[in-house]
Amino acid sequence: YTANKYLSALKSRDYEKAYSYLSNNSKTLISFTDYVKTSEDYYSRVGNWDFKDLKIYYFDNNQSVVTYKIKESNEWKDDYLNFIKEHDIWTRPYVWNLFEQIDEAFGSKDFSKALFLSQKLYLIDPLDPRSSGYLCWSEYFMRLYDKSLESCRRTIEISAIYPIKYYDADEIFWYRFNYADSLKFSGKNEEAIKIFDTLVGLGDVPLKNKCSVFISRADAYSRIKNYENTLKDLSSAVSVCGEGAEKADAEKRIAMLNGLMCGESVRFFKNYR
């Protein structure tokens, strides 16, 4: 196993050998000097460690996931490693220093930068669900809905089979919402409505989370000229949304549908995006 060789090199602190197992894309991201410093910083805190029970969890021609047990601080716990094939050689993706950069970009609402870094992350490690997850959000915020519908769907699918659960049920709810909303904005309204139906029907989800679902499903219904269901969903949104922009928006649309703002109503539903 390449995994065994890689972990053995780390355990013996042979960082030059461990670095040689990194993918070429990873090496463009972190220099050997920085890799040594990062590794030394981590293992100096951890102290002596060990590993055992390596098993292939997932495998295809170009990607694999290996699970194993690692002992740190005298405690065994489950862990995993991803590998990708480059030029018929199995290599280790190394992306840890990208996560913080992407989070900072999102925090400053620099979605263009977040998208650039997320694309780099996905290029290096496509099998990690977080790679697709960051792409999902950055593409969605950049209104690249034809792309976000794929990355959001992929996040949901990979998360379901991945050995480590990075996203809890509430986070998966929002990835499903983004997927449905991306379908809607891509003109696939019937498909979007089916997913919105599922999200509305979930019993273990806070009502406040369903506020956005009712509003977005109302949008989808209005796009296929089903104004009766549009009105029903907007009324539901008013009842579950807290005070704020979403509730005010829903109330405005109800007024327009009821003919209280007739001229604006026609223009709104023709031009709303």
Image (tube, rainbow, N blue to C red):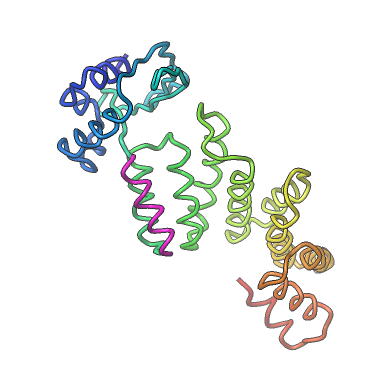
Count of marks overlaid on the render: 0
Foreground of the two, 70 or 220: 70
Viewed as shown, does residue 64 lie left or right of 140?
left
Q: Residue at x 34, y 55 (%)?
A: 116
**x, y percent for residue 248:** 71, 75
Q: Is residue 100 magenta?
A: yes
Q: What residue is drawn where x is 38% and y is 21%?
A: 72
Compared with residue 126, is residue 116 higher up or lower down, i.e. above or below?
below
64 sits to left or right of 48:
right
Question: Residue 224's spot in the image, x, y percent?
Answer: 73, 64
Does the stretch in magenta take in 168?
Answer: no
The stretch of residues the image draws in magenta is: 96-109
Spot the residue most to the top. Answer: 53
Residue at 54% x, 33% y: name it: 165
Q: Position of residue 105 (x, y in %)?
A: 38, 58
Give the position of the N terminus as an image quadrant: top left
Q: Residue at x 82, y 83 (%)?
A: 259
Q: Quadrant of residue 39?
A: top left
Q: Looking at the image, is 226 positioned above or below residue 162?
A: below
- Vertical relation: 2 (above or below) 256: above
Which quadrant does the C terminus fall into? bottom right
* Residue 149 spot, x, y in % from top left: 54, 51
Q: Mostly what secondary structure, the magenta segment?
A: helix
Which one is in front, 81 or 78? 78
